[in-house]
Amino acid sequence: MGLPLLSIILPTFNERQNIIPLYDDIKKHIERLDINYEIIFVDDNSPDRTIEEIKLLSVKDKNVKYILMSRRFGDQISLMAGLEHASGDMVIVMDSDLQHPPRYIPIMVEKWEAGAEIVIMKRQEEGHSSWFKKWTEIIFYKLLQKMSKTPIFSRFSGFALIDKKVVHKLCMFEENEPFVRGLIGFVGYQKIEIPYREDKRVFGSSKYNILSLFDLAFSGITSFSEKPLYWALYSGVFATAIALVHVLYVLWERIFGDIPELGWATTIIVVTFLGGIQLISMGILGIYLSKIFLETKKRPRYIIAESNT
């Protein structure tokens, strides 16, 4: 029996300056291990020509593979493309901005050799200075854990080692909007969590702004919980109850009160409140309906423009 094969999947988007430092750091730590390896870069059609740096590496090192998407599909779909093309007995998924430190790779492989089927890297300290991002992330995971019946790992930023048999199960999911961090919790298997300290980004800037973070949060919530639909129902019941109380109040004032005619302020408040509840409910329903719409089309999840895998 030969040496085990490790696949490292690195989704990239506008990370040209980070490619060489990341590769060098990964190589330094992999060479300490008695294993074979492949490094798979999945470029999400970066406009900064990240793919050119990756192609140069693949010429120098036959263990470097690449997948170039035909257009931008998003990091979650890029990650699924990498999983579907990985050949390793174990697969490590990590960001390509060097905030997921390659120095933890030997520890992850050691846990796999000891029998762990999924190694979850749990972030303890952030490599960014944004307190807003930190606390919104904490709140999101707490909320998702409360709402979902699927185990969701807190402070899990997508840095993990996954056994081959688990990768095969993950590739069975054909969702058009996969939330990979949630799918890893859904499939089960033996998991172990390891705390780590995230490094600071040296080159470039984060591809997640506030809007994209909210998009990811909504994708995760609507993929693994139906509770927002119930919340829409409950908010409608609550709004109806408020309106009924107001009707009784108006009737009381008309019959027994001294006020001959109530003002417009209360009417405007009630109408605005009910309108807000209706719009929120319609928005929640719209998100779920759009997911159903995308799934029924059966379009390919992604299109590869070029690959050497």
Image (spheres, rainbow, N blue to C red):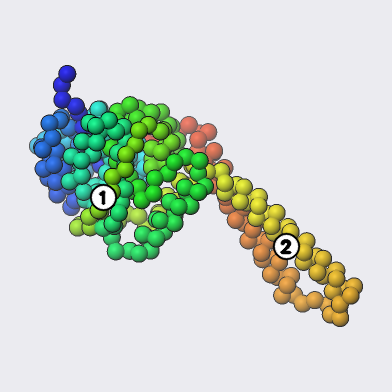
Label of residue 242 in the image:
2
Residue 97 location, x and y as percent?
Answer: 24, 51
Q: In the image, is residue 166 above or below residue 148? A: above
Quarter of the rendering containing residue 301: top left
Q: Residue at x 14, y 49 (%)?
A: 21
Which of labels 2 and 1 is toward the front?
Answer: 1
Residue 198 location, x and y as percent?
Answer: 25, 53
Q: Residues within 10 Å of mark 1 (few under 14, many from 20)?
A: some
Amino acid under disc 2: Ile
User: Viewer-proximal residue, 53 or 235?
Assistant: 235
Q: Residue at x 23, y 57 (%)?
A: 200
Sequence-wise, which precedes: disc 2 or disc 1?
Answer: 1
Amino acid under disc 1: Tyr
Label of residue 196 in the image:
1
Q: Residue at x 19, y 58 (%)?
A: 202
Residue furthest out toward the front = 114
Question: Does dot 1 land on a helix, a strand or a loop?
Answer: strand
Residue furthest out toward the bottom = 258
